[in-house]
Image (cartoon, rainbow, N blue to C red):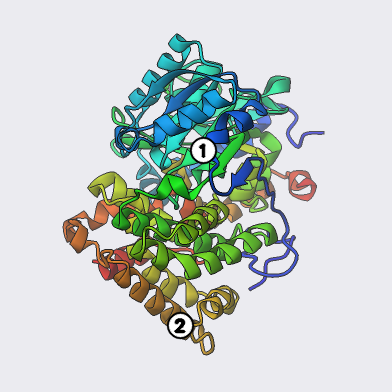
Amino acid sequence: MPYFKDADEVYAYIGKLFQDLAEDEELSPKFQKADTIVQYHYRNPESIITVSLREDDPGRVDCGDTTMEPEVVMTMDADTAHRFWLGKVNVTVALARGQMKAKGPVAKILKLVPLTKPIFPRYRAILEQSGRQDLLDAA
Amino acid sequence: MTGLASDPLARQMTGFKDFYQYLSTTRVISGRDLLGSVGFEFLKEGAQRVFVVTDGVIRGTGLVERVEDGVRDGGLEVVGVFDDVPQDSSTDVVEACAAAAKEAGADSFLAIGGGSVMDTAKVADAVFTHGGTARDQEGFLLMPRENDGMGRPLDIAPLACVPTTAGTGSEVSMAAVIKDHEHKVKLEIADFPLFPRLAILDPETTRTLPPALAAATGMDAMTHAVEAYVSVDWSPHQDARSLQALRMIRDNLERAVETPEDDVARGNMLIAANIAISIALGSVHAMSHPAGAHFNVPHGVANAIHLPHVIRFNAEGGDDIADRYRDIAELFGVESGGSGAEVGDALATHISATVERLGLPLTLSQVGVPESGIPALVEGAMGDGTTLLNPREPSESDYEELYKRAM
């Protein structure tokens, strides 16, 4: 059974994490160095988060429909995304096993991978503040 | 530090590996006088109407005609020859190649050449089989599959490779790199169907290889073997290949460069390059890819320049990493005791001396890279996928320092 019951839950937690990062004055400029638009296409439940990481553009995150045209598309189960943000997924292994699939100039986002490690506690905190210990325990 | 299953982000350089997968699906034939039986062997892989992919230089040596004769001798038909592959192939070349194969009514591809030729043939085969553009093929494990993309990948037309350099290993790899001039990027394509069905290793194919090219491609093979052995994505399967490749490179590379008529050395280098190849690489490749993209530094030359500096950097990253370099140092007969820094320095010094004897450049400035280019190189290296597989995590400032040392 998937961790999230519907797309709204994905947006409430993973989407909120992206929103928080876009508004973070210290972290946002580091991610914008990628100068791209990334779309995360999640399965089970079907959900889409599109993130603008443009250097000349304020951070923008669209949950669901978007007018942004992604340059990189990352496809994975929402469960994999949840486990990734909890620090429980090795990206290179996930790519090798096909648990994460990447389309487009993947190098642009691979260089962001080392920047994500300090963010894992933030995702955990979002879940804790939302009273979703069940999602923490399940992963 | 030894990573445990409970900490998937930790580096794990020893013990029982938490996860790896190993594939090597290409049938490899190695030996003398094989060119006459290319058709006999390719027929077993389902080929009937063969489309040959090569470049003008190789064609000028007469090798292509000899292989064509071998194809026909097996009862197969050569329906066309595409010899327009440049040193660094690109999306427009791939699409022209696929269109020409379609026009000729081909049912299979035969690549005769180095890495650029073989990568062109791989991606052209994918476009030929599945349609679309070269850019549509980009990605990791993204080729069409059964069961809504989750099942077995769909085959592409049979592909055979006859490598004419001993370095790239593309004839047995599932990866291809193609330049996209319009978007100024290198497209990386990797999936299981890109493993060629057949690779033919015959020292006759490298007989006319210029010594400088033999040296550079040989250092590419050495770099594959060293990086795969110390990568965080190491595996016991690849370890066995890397160490044997390094033994063969140790015993044959300089001979093959100094005495090109030595077909034993050339043949053994073809095999060494073939077993050294891996997609589990590291910071040497991360540094060399942008050096090629921005300053056209030949890949093998760039690897030869960067390898000693990355060894010194990595070997100071922990005892578990240093111990892997210790194995390589021992194999080369280099002093392998002492601290990580000491074994790294001893091995790096040995490799630099080899590079010098091979007559290759030792610095980036010798190949026209200016200091002002370092920021762009650092950005490229940080964004290269192989950075994630390096045993010691490099920062931007680490890469900046490594490039400065390589100047």
In the figure, residue A130 lies in which quadrant? top right
Whole-percent x, y for residue B207 in the image: 39, 50
Q: Nearer the viewer, residue B330 or B306?
A: B330
Query: If you read the primary sequence from the N terminus, does the residue marked by circle 1 or circle 2 appear first?
Result: 1
At a point 42% along the width and 22% down the height, the residue shown is: A69
Q: Nearer the viewer, residue B336 or A79?
A: B336
Secondary structure of residue under mark 1: helix
The residue tagged 1 is B35
At a point 57% along the width and 79% down the height, the residue shown is: B319
Task: Tell me if residue B127 can be seen.
Answer: yes
The residue tagged 2 is B341
Please, is residue B170 above or below residue A44 in the view? below
Whole-percent x, y for residue B324 in the image: 58, 73
Whole-percent x, y for residue B261 in the image: 38, 58
Provide the chain ID for the residue under circle 1: B
At a point 29% along the width and 30% down the height, the residue shown is: B181
Q: Nearer the viewer, residue A118 or B291?
A: B291
Please, is residue B50 above or below residue A39 in the view? above
**Amino acid type, callout 2:** Ala
